[in-house]
Amino acid sequence: MNSVKLIGNVGREVTVREVESGKMVTFSVATNEKYVNKNKEEVKTVVWHSVVAWGQAAVHCEKLLEKGKLISVEGKLSYRQYQNKEDQMVKVTEIVAFKVEEVTKAQEVS
């Protein structure tokens, strides 16, 4: 099963596009990770994720999302590639979101 759930902060304003099938939005989500290294020091890192949503999910995201907002994203991983203007192959990994919700601090802890 291809399933992803992230809780993080919206990294940039949503980009909205009109396509044949309706709307498409793209945005980024930053998640925080931490671990203890071999020197027993806590290391914190931020991981950025690219997200795309289509149709009604896109309409919902357009209304809900703003930079910095804490959200939950549920969807699936998608891999694609394309040839850019410099004739180089570009590989893209993104999350195709089907559910996006605002998260309160209390929900984040649980």
Image (cartoon, rainbow, N blue to C red):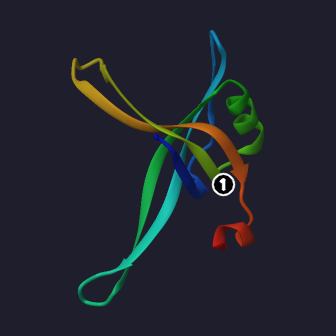
Q: What residue lies at 64% left-to-right and 56% top-to-bottom?
A: 68
Kind of element beneath mark 1: strand
**Residue at the bottom extreme, as displayed:** 40
Quarter of the image where one finds residue 25: top right
Q: Position of residue 107 (x, y in %)?
A: 71, 67
Q: Is residue 109 above or below residue 15?
A: below
Query: Most extreme residue toward the top, as rendered?
Result: 20
Q: Quadrant of residue 93?
A: top left
Q: Amino acid at mark 1?
A: Ile
Residue at 44% x, 63% y: name it: 46
Q: Is residue 4 left or right of residue 69?
A: left
- Residue 86 x, y percent position in the rendering: 23, 20
Residue bearing mark 1: 71
**Residue 99 shown left or right of residue 78 in the figure:** right
Give the x, y percent position of residue 15: 60, 32
Q: Residue furthest front?
A: 1
Q: Nearer the viewer, residue 46 or 77?
A: 77
Q: Position of 97 compared to 38: left or right?
A: right
- In the rendered image, residue 90, in percent from the top left (x then y), is placed at 28, 28
Residue under the image location 74 percent in, 72 percent down: 106
Reply above or below: 84 against 41.
above
Determine the residue positioned at 74% across, 30% down.
59
Q: How many marks?
A: 1
Q: Crowding at label 1, few (<14), some or many (≥20) Cα neighbours within 10 Å?
A: many
Q: Is residue 110 above or below residue 82?
A: below
Answer above or below: position of 71 versus 15.
below
